[in-house]
Image (cartoon, rainbow, N blue to C red):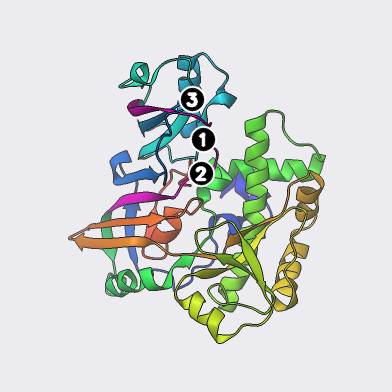
Amino acid sequence: MGALSALPPEWLECALAPPRASAHPSAQACLKKEPEDFKVSERLGFVADGGSAHVLLEVEKRGRDTLGVARQLARAAGVPSRDVGFAGLKDRVAVATQWFTVPATQTAAQWMLQEGDGFKVLRAEPHSRKLRRGALQGNHFQIRLTELGGDTSTLQARLEALPSTGVPNYFGLQRFGREGSNLFAVQRLLESGRLPAGREARGFVLSAARALVFNAVLAERVQQGSWNQLLPGELVNLDGRGSWFVADVIDATLLARLEAFDIHPTGPLAGARSESVGASRALEDAVLERFQPLPAVLEQVGLEAARRPLRVIPREFVASWQDNTLELSFVLPPGAYATMVVRELVATSDATVEGHDD
């Protein structure tokens, strides 16, 4: 594990190897042998509005990270990188189709078919507003797993069950950086009390810290078997929305909505806390106490607490395998990681943890 061994063992488990909802897969496969093995395309859920302030660009990238493409687009537009909008970070080792906005220093027609290092513009339309992070309906993934081997006798059962059970909504390896680099940045934050210079660097360390704490709470719920259940006092997420409510009493109506995936249990994105109560709060407090002073630091730097669903349901799920290749197609909501779906099905060899699939 090399330098990673200098990090707290519980950090490593929660970030890099959190417990699965089911037994460790007996089948193995290779993930992302080629960028074409991992395709993702964003679904915006809206269309360009014809406004004059920005241009909405649909961009295909291969072997490039989102921030690198954003910087190239900013140079082409003659604007600072911060003026380029995008809804989510996408994996570098992938073929990704995603949306950006750039200030309208050029017309939509001038942007059409522009190309850069590892990307090309597929579509350009006038739009009034900068695209904000998370402003997505979802992401469609097409994943090809090669070199499938091992004991595949239970794989078909897992494939059939997954759309009706979902998977734990962990933050993936990508959130913690290549070779755990973002975790080391979190450790330096705790030791020095100072955030790194630069907006991007600060964003990475704070998001990794929040993800670590969330994964720890979710891991505890997985181990207790309650990750897909409602606890008294649960803060309950409404599916597809950023809102939640307190479930003071777990009645038949709530249980039916839970089974229908209309609502989901949630875990904390640490900051100035939004309180759960009862059994849910007791569990979260116990986990957060183990990770102190990290939750306190996240509150002190001014992050506002939020919630994240503990489970995610792959929609439009289609799977097939032939010989030693498994192909998957599914849709996830913004912020959910396709790699967390894959790890419930097969054990994978994948050394590429750059980027994101949110």
Q: Which amino acid, by three-letter code, is at mark 3? A: His
Tell me residue 210's x, y (percent).
66, 52
Residue beneath disc 3 = 54
First-in-chain label (3 vs 2): 3
Q: Residue 57 versus residue 26: which sits nearer the camera?
A: 57
> Observer-nearest residue: 317 or 112?
112
Q: Do the residues labelled 1 and 3 touch (CB within 8 Å)?
A: yes
Classify residue 295 by image quadrant: bottom right
Residue 135: mark in rendering = 2
| The residue positioned farthest toward the left in the image shown | 323
Local crowd at mark 2 within 10 Å, few (<14), some, or many (≥20)? some
Q: Give the range drawn in magenta.
A: 120-145
Residue position marked by numbered label 1 in the rendering = 131
Residue at figure coordinates x 70%, y 44% from the top left: 186
User: Which residue is more in the foreground, 215 or 147?
Assistant: 215
Q: Kindly indicate whether the residue at mark 2 contacts the one at mark 1 (C-beta within 8 angstroms).
A: yes
**Structural crowding at the residue carrying mark 1, measured as other residues with C-alpha within 10 Å and reported as few (<14), some (14–19) or many (≥20):** many
